[in-house]
Amino acid sequence: MSHQRKNRIVTPKDEWSTPDWLFNLLNEEFHFSLDAAANGANAKCPGYCDKLGDSIKIDWFYHSCGGSIFLNPPYSSGNIDRFMAKALEESKKGAVVVCLVPCATDTKWWHNYVMKAQEIRFIRGRVRFVGYDEQGKQIKNSPTFSSCVVIFDWKAGIIGNPVIGKTIEQPRKVPG
């Protein structure tokens, strides 16, 4: 007998939120001032760019006031490529951009952008992103792929040949 969800998921595909435990872990290190692909319901920082609006067109470095930028881009077709190109561009202006993306070493965007990052951190296990059902109840769901954290920091001086950084361990029992 298979498990079936009682309520329909209403969170649109590109609006699933980063779990708090992962964002908080990264925020402790990078002190984010801008969430570059969010909306009012899933933003992790007081400063955020609406990914459904003009996020790609605005200057993230300017809007972050020179602080670090968090990016969990929309994963639908073509969006990761556009957002990762923007992350690389903003890092060249001096921003530190930390991206949560699928491990997709077989894609053009991976080779065009991720391989120009300074660091890649793999996440052990599948990330359980946060969404909502039609009753407004929070639900967590894992995609069918693994995720990683890609760090663009051109101030570090290394361009290309990213370092494989420490593995991110998920808590055994992921808090709320």
Image (spheres, helix red, strand yellow):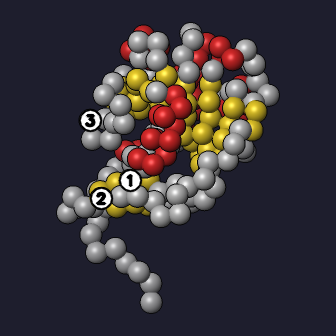
Q: Secondary structure at mark 3?
A: loop
Q: CA distance from mark 2 to mark 1?
A: 7 Å
Q: Depth check: 27 or 86 in front?
A: 27
Q: CA distance from mark 3 to mark 2?
A: 16 Å
Q: Is residue 45 above or below residue 149?
A: above
The numbered mark, 3 or 2, whose residue comes first in the sequence reads 3
The reply to whether callout 2 and callout 1 are in contact (CB within 8 Å) is: yes
Q: Is residue 92 left or right of residue 174?
A: right
In which quadrant of the rendered image does the C terminus lie? bottom left
Label disc, if present, on residue 138 of the rendered structure:
2
Q: Which residue reaches farthest bottom?
A: 1
Q: CA distance from mark 3 to mark 1?
A: 14 Å
Q: Quadrant of residue 87?
A: top right
In which quadrant of the rendered image does the N terminus lie? bottom left
Q: Secondary structure at mark 2?
A: strand
The numbered mark, 3 or 1, whose residue comes first in the sequence reads 3
- Identify the residue position indicated by label 3 in the image: 40
Mark 1: which amino acid?
Val
Mark 2: which amino acid?
Gln
Residue found 46% across the figure and 41% down from its top: 23
| Residue 25 visible in the snapshot | yes
Residue found 76% across the figure and 33% down from its top: 163
Residue 32: x, y in percent? Answer: 44, 27
- Identify the residue position indicated by label 1 in the image: 130
